[in-house]
Image (cartoon, rainbow, N blue to C red):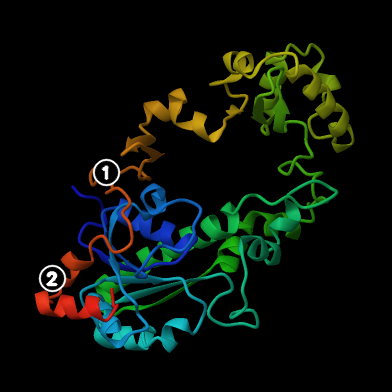
Amino acid sequence: MAGPLHGVRVIEIASIGPGPLAAMLLADMGAEVIRVDRPGPAAGGMVPPHQDISRRGRRSIALDVKQDAAREVLLRLIEGADVLVEGFRPGVMERLGLGPDACLARNPRLVYGRMTGWGQEGPLATAAGHDINYIALAGALGMIGTPEAPVTPLNLVGDYGGGTMLLAFGIACALFEARGSGKGQVVDAAMVDGVSLLMTLFHSVQAAGRTRPRGTGVLDGGSHYYGSYRCADGGWISLGSIEPQFYALLLDKLGIEDPAAWPQHDASRWPALKAELAHRFAQKTRDEWCALLEGTDVCFAPVLALDEVPGHPHQKARDAFYTQDGLTQPAPAPRFSRSAPERPRAPVAAGTDTEAILRELGYGDADIAALRGAGVG
């Protein structure tokens, strides 16, 4: 099998952040994804195209969609597609003549996936923003960090957790519905909405009156049994000994002879107990702690540097990473017992497949030369 989404065709309008990762996930699962890039040299990004893992698994056509001829090419692509993914601010695609009404008129079964930070409407809809702003407005940033200040958790929570995953889930749901109704629809995926959903547990905790100030709770670094500790060699380890039986095992493994002196849920003792654990973990190297605690029900893992991750025995046993053209990358996930996807195509530069895709759409030599001459692609 070629993956559970084999037979699904996706048109991705090139963007940044969550849109490309969502398109990658769809491609990983076997969808045919055609990325529509801008002509010319790529704008300055963090990595060159051939090393941009989020571009893997699809072909690329270069089109200047501000030109009528290029828009017609794109609309022809859309006629044969199941999904379109775009990540512009609200109104941009409409001004280009490529909004939902225009695209659904050409293909009524199209799932039109829209990825924005603030959503398609609301007082902030057209404002610029980034991950940190979306997680701030959704209440996540205010709960992450120390009592002194919030700490930015990379751009994982808003861009990818709240954005990519919400968009991919929404597209999958709309595709399922379209199989029965024969009709497409718009999927309005907003990062701020996705982060709010990720915060569901903490809204429940608040409703129960059990919230604590930032940096003083169980999960945010306040407790001594859920956090990270520095080792003798400068490495770090992580603990998550929340359940009482796991906490009891931690104390036993550390050779603590008087567990009563280590009350797990007495928050007034957490700072002192955390300091004591920091002292104890500083006496051995990370590898020594791994030998004692890894694989036990203490809920333990070493804190790995990114280049260490693929080589960890657990990651290797699950074939969680692979190397292609010298680029080590995460393997497609989740895993499927029957319709396992194939290894994705390596990332390609913008416009690599322009001519091949144009020919598939019925454009001949003269048409392609005219489009090239007009700077369409």
Q: Which residue is mark 1?
A: 343
* Res. 42 image quadrant: bottom left
The C terminus appears in which quarter of the rendering? bottom left
For label 2, the SS is: helix
Instruction: Work out whether residue 188 can be spotted.
Output: yes
Would you name the residue on which mark 2 appears?
359
Name the residue at the front extreme: 373
Residue in the foreground of this view, choosing between 289 and 235: 235
Instruction: Judge the density around disc 1: few (<14), some (14-19), many (≥20) Cα neighbours within 10 Å.
Output: some
288 is higher (above) or lower (below) than 306? above
Q: Mark 1 belongs to which amino acid?
A: Arg
Toward the viewer: 210 or 325? 325
Residue at image point 23% right, 67% down? 354
The residue type indicated by label 2 comes to: Arg
Label 2 – label 1 distance at C-alpha? 26 Å
**What residue is at 46 percent from the left and 71 percent from the top?**
87
Question: Which is more foreground, mark 2 or mark 1?
Answer: 2
Q: Horizontally, is 134 left or right of 38 in the view?
A: right
Tell me where residue 362 appears, x and y as whole percent.
Answer: 11, 76
Height in image: 308 above or below 191?
above
Q: Can you give x and y, in whole percent of width and height, for residue 344 in the image?
A: 28, 47
Q: Residue at x 76, y 48 (%)?
A: 145
In the image: residue 116, left or right of residue 34: right
2 or 1: tag closer to the N-terminus: 1
Residue drawn where x is 73% and y is 19% of the image: 281
Mark 1: secondary structure: loop
> Dot 2, crowdedness within 10 Å: few (<14), some or many (≥20)?
few
Depicted 277 relative to depicted 219: above or below: above
